[in-house]
Amino acid sequence: MTAITISDGTTTVTMPQTDQVSDAGAMEYKALTMAGGREVHRITGFRPGFTYAYDYAPATTVRALAALLRAGTFFTVGYFDLDGEDKSGTFSITYPLPKVFKYDENGVAVWHDFSLTIKAQEVI
């Protein structure tokens, strides 16, 4: 799989193919202040996350994704990991912020140069 699918259970949006993926995971912790004033961090786990960069996407896909993201907070995402494995999970997703709009040679409206970051709902 080189494309991710995002679903809310009734509507599914399939993003275009991408080969640009980077790790956006983070350690989760709770900050505690000790009696002496020193702050310590108690690690609760790792929250997986990934950023997928897109050179282009049809305007209809970006519009459908924005409508889907407005409808909820967590979505089922079929994605590929940095190791190339296909996986599925529940994630929050950032809004796409495309920078360039133009029509391709076939007259199709296309957004260029944007990325999506997905962050897992659960800490592992």
Image (cartoon, helix red, strand yellow):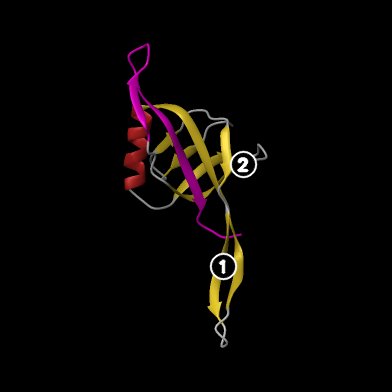
The x, y position of residue 81, in whole percent, is: 62, 41
Residue type for callout 2 = Asp
Q: Name the residue under label 1.
A: 29
The relative height of residue 61 versus residue 118 in the rendered view (above or below) is above
The residue sitting at the top extreme is: 105
* Quarter placement of the N terminus: top right
Residue at (38, 43) in percent of width and height: 95
123 vs 16, left or right, is: right
Q: Mark 2 points at which residue?
A: 81
Residue at (48, 37) in percent of width and height: 5
Q: Is residue 115 magenta?
A: yes
Residue at (56, 33) in percent of width and height: 20
Residue type for callout 1 = Tyr
Q: Residues within 10 Å of mark 2 (few under 14, many from 20)?
A: some
Which is in the foreground here, disc 2 or disc 1? 1
The x, y position of residue 85, in whole percent, is: 65, 39
Q: Is residue 97 magenta?
A: no
- Element class at badge 1: strand
The relative height of residue 4 versus residue 104 in the rendered view (above or below) is below
Residue range corresponding to the magenta coloring: 98-124
Evaluate if marks 2 and 1 touch, with contact meaning CB atoms under 8 Å apart: no
Residue at (46, 41) in percent of width and height: 116
The residue sitting at the front extreme is: 37
